[in-house]
Amino acid sequence: MMKIELIEEPKQSLVDFLEEKINEYNQENWEVKQQIPLAVKIADEDGETIAGAAGRTFGDWFLLDTLWVSESLRGKNIGTQLLTTIEQAAIKRGCKKSLLDTLNFQAMPFYQQYGYSVEWTQQGYPKTGCKYFMSKVLATS
């Protein structure tokens, strides 16, 4: 007989297994078979990463997972350079649209400045804040 077991602190191996099974199912059924990672970074003289962005391209879409600039470099146009560089690389891969999410204390006004629109806002995330899901049509010329 099958039994549902509640696991308060699951091992990472179980989480990875379940994620792998969903990915296998998606691969069999999704029209796009490959998500290709993409990243840009800036390193200091010692080779330490001081700013960067990462995401993935699939089909017509670029999903920006993260964009980070060290505190000492903020306000110096570095974020703009990272965003522009990674978007241009996504366009070269054939992407026509971009998607990201950002929290209320992060960078929503920054992304709006570069053409992103809020598609949906999740209020009360995780308690009193909110999360913005934003998209943009990428320029192809």
Image (cartoon, rainbow, N blue to C red):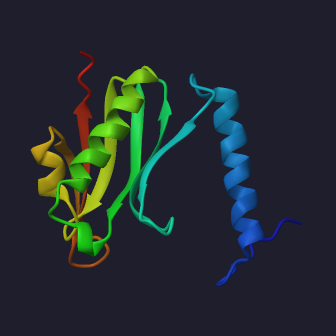
Residue farthest along the bottom direction in this orientation: 8
Residue farthest along the front direction in this orientation: 45
Tell me what residue is drawn at x 70 percent, y 29 percent: 28
Residue 66 lies, with reference to residue 129, above or below; the image says above
Residue 124 seen in render:
no
Question: Quadrant of the image for the C terminus?
Answer: top left
Q: Position of residue 122 (x, y in %)?
A: 25, 60
- Asked where in the image residue 110 lies, by quadrant, the reply is bottom left
Q: Position of residue 118 (x, y in %)?
A: 17, 46
Residue 55 seen in render:
yes
Q: In the image, is 4 to the left or to the right of 77?
A: right
Q: In the image, is 52 to the left or to the right of 56?
A: left
Tell me what residue is drawn at x 75 percent, y 67 percent: 14
Closer to us: 30 or 92: 92
Q: In the image, is 61 to the left or to the right of 120?
A: right
Residue 78 lies, with reference to residue 6, above or below; the image says above
Closer to us: 5 or 128: 128
- Asked where in the image residue 63 lies, by quadrant, the reply is top left
Total marks shown come to: 0
Tell me what residue is drawn at x 57 percent, y 25 percent: 32
Question: Quadrant of the image for the N terminus?
Answer: bottom right
Tell me what residue is drawn at x 28 percent, y 59 percent: 102
Q: Position of residue 66 (x, y in %)?
A: 39, 56
Q: Position of residue 48 (x, y in %)?
A: 48, 68
- Asked where in the image residue 68 lies, by quadrant, the reply is bottom left
Residue farthest along the right direction in this orientation: 1
